[in-house]
Amino acid sequence: MQLADRMTRIGIESAFEVLQRARALEAQGKNIVHLEIGQPDFPTPAHVKEAAKRALDEGWTGYGPTPGYPDFRQAIADYISTSRGIAVTGQNVIVVPGGKPIMFFSMLAVVEPGDEVIYPNPGFPIYESVINFLGATPVPIPLVEARGFSFDLDLFESKLSSRTKMIVLNSPANPTGGVIPKADLARIADLVRNRDLLILSDEIYSRICYEEVPSSITQFDGMLEKTIILDGFSKTYSMTGWRLGYGVMPVWVAEAVDKLMVNSNSCTASFTQRAGLAALKGPQDDVDKMVAEFRRRRDAIVKGLNEIPGFRCTVPAGAFYVFPNITGTGLSSRELADMLLNEAGVACLSGTAFGSYGDGYLRFSYANSLENIQEALARIRKLSERWATASVGR
């Protein structure tokens, strides 16, 4: 008995692989600074935890409606309508356990073998994994460092074809922290408005931004009816382990995703939905404090990396990642990431974990304390003497 052939086409998320390697080194007694995993190091807000405890005591422990409880779906719709300046209702919302089901279900519902899916590269690796799994054709569009890690729009336009079935956008982005400028979204909207395709707009980091609030492509004429917004609670409310996300989409897509949910998960846990309702409707002070602290860490790690020989780091506009260019070290992304882990005790990810166009970069998550970030920078600086000396001899 062998696995189905399609299993050869499904990938993994390298952050968890590196985390396991780092944990193995810790088990051997090595001290590791963890900058590899995209998980806020802040507690879930107290009022959200209290809402979950109360829900358990009140008996919210059974099956719920497959697409989510109506009052919760409507609260999400109200939040999306207000934050994006659009008009959606609870009928447009499907609640799922985490953000990834929206990626998987959206593509599964509309993408067929032979269809093309455009997506950012370097980008979240699950995009390409699901595209390949479904037998569709991945069409990666490189993110350009000089453009704040946004698309080369001329290249984007040239890659559109009659077979393009879906376009994946991610802003603020993982791994780069880049935000797609409003003018770029306007041009993308103009290019696809009259095409028969859907957009998957991954906006999971929408609240973690520093200069200005990111725009959503749904804000442009004709885009709301052809866009699936992916958002959730993991990043904004530090609820990664709660597995609570949602998609906002045209009703005809929501009906298909509802079928996929009932065939796979039945429903999202009832008590976590009550916690999510409290998160949306309760005080937002904890979110504001978290983002302010992330800004402080961002500024520190960008400054520190730019002082290390061979590194060049742009300032990310959102999320909690930096994506420095390390071509000046003379090492490949994989070589340097392995060296930092094994010799310096700093866990990070090779840019190639996010696609071939990530070569020459590393991803550091600054979802760790400022003290630990400074320690990591000191370790990298010390190790940099090796490649700095080698470059002098070249």
Image (cartoon, rainbow, N blue to C red):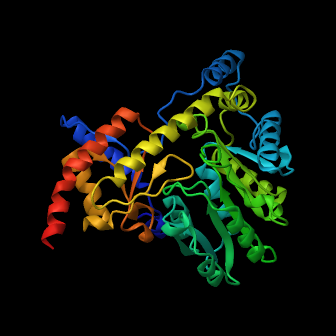
Query: Looking at the image, can residue 264 be seen?
Result: yes
Could you say which is closer to the camera, residue 204 or residue 374? 374
Q: Residue at x 62, y 72 (%)?
A: 117
Could you say which is closer to the camera, residue 47 or residue 274? 47
Q: Quadrant of residue 166?
A: bottom right
- The reply, left or right, for residue 78 in relation to residue 272 is right
Quadrant for the C terminus in the image: bottom left
- The reply, left or right, for residue 3 in relation to residue 346 is right
Q: Residue at x 27, y 39 (%)?
A: 32
Q: Position of residue 163 (x, y in %)?
A: 67, 81
Could you say which is closer to the camera, residue 232 or residue 20? 232
Q: Position of residue 104 (x, y in %)?
A: 61, 58
Quadrant for the N terminus in the image: bottom left
Give above or below for 76 relative to 58. below
Q: Position of residue 172 (x, y in %)?
A: 59, 54
Q: Position of residue 186 (x, y in %)?
A: 75, 68
Query: Looking at the image, can residue 239 be seen?
Result: no
Number of numbered discs = 0
Give above or below for 335 relative to 77. below
Furthest toward the left, the residue is 393
